[in-house]
Image (cartoon, rainbow, N blue to C red):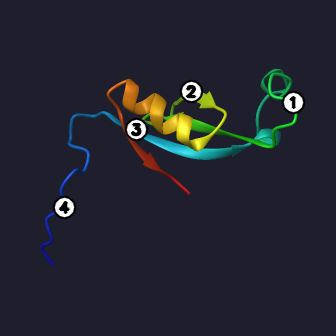
Amino acid sequence: MNTKFENLPGDEGNIVYIRRVELDSLPDEVRQQVPGTDSLYAVHGIDGERLALVKDRKLAFFLARQNDLSPVSVH
């Protein structure tokens, strides 16, 4: 099957992955900064390095795009 897709990230190495992170999997110092929240969203580089933690998914995508990165959701 040869289907052409437009608007996919290129091979420039600017892809980042967005995923939900349960708060209980994060260090105490991070959990203390976000009381009343059960999860955050992480922005990960192509190599798996966590680049940022933000409050919600929309903000994670916004942050990536503002830094000329192509966000991809990971479940």
The residue pinned by badge 1 equals: 35
Horizontal and vertical percent position of residue 53: 62, 30
The residue drawn where x is 12% and y is 73% is: 2
Q: Which mark is residue 5?
A: 4
Do the CB atoms of the residues marked 4 and 1 lie less than 8 Å apart?
no
Along the polypeptide, which appears first: circle 2 or circle 1? 1
Along the polypeptide, which appears first: circle 2 or circle 4? 4
Q: Alpha carbon of mark 2 to alpha carbon of mark 1: how far?
A: 18 Å
Where is 72 relative to 23, above or below? below
The residue pinned by badge 2 equals: 52
In terms of secondary structure, where does tag 2 sit? strand
| The C terminus: image quadrant | bottom right
The residue pinned by badge 3 equals: 46
- Whether residue 34 is visible, yes or no, is yes
Along the polypeptide, which appears first: circle 2 or circle 3? 3
Q: Alpha carbon of mark 4 to alpha carbon of mark 1: how far?
A: 42 Å
Along the polypeptide, which appears first: circle 4 or circle 3? 4
In terms of secondary structure, where does tag 1 sit? loop
The answer to which quarter of the image holds residue 12 is top left
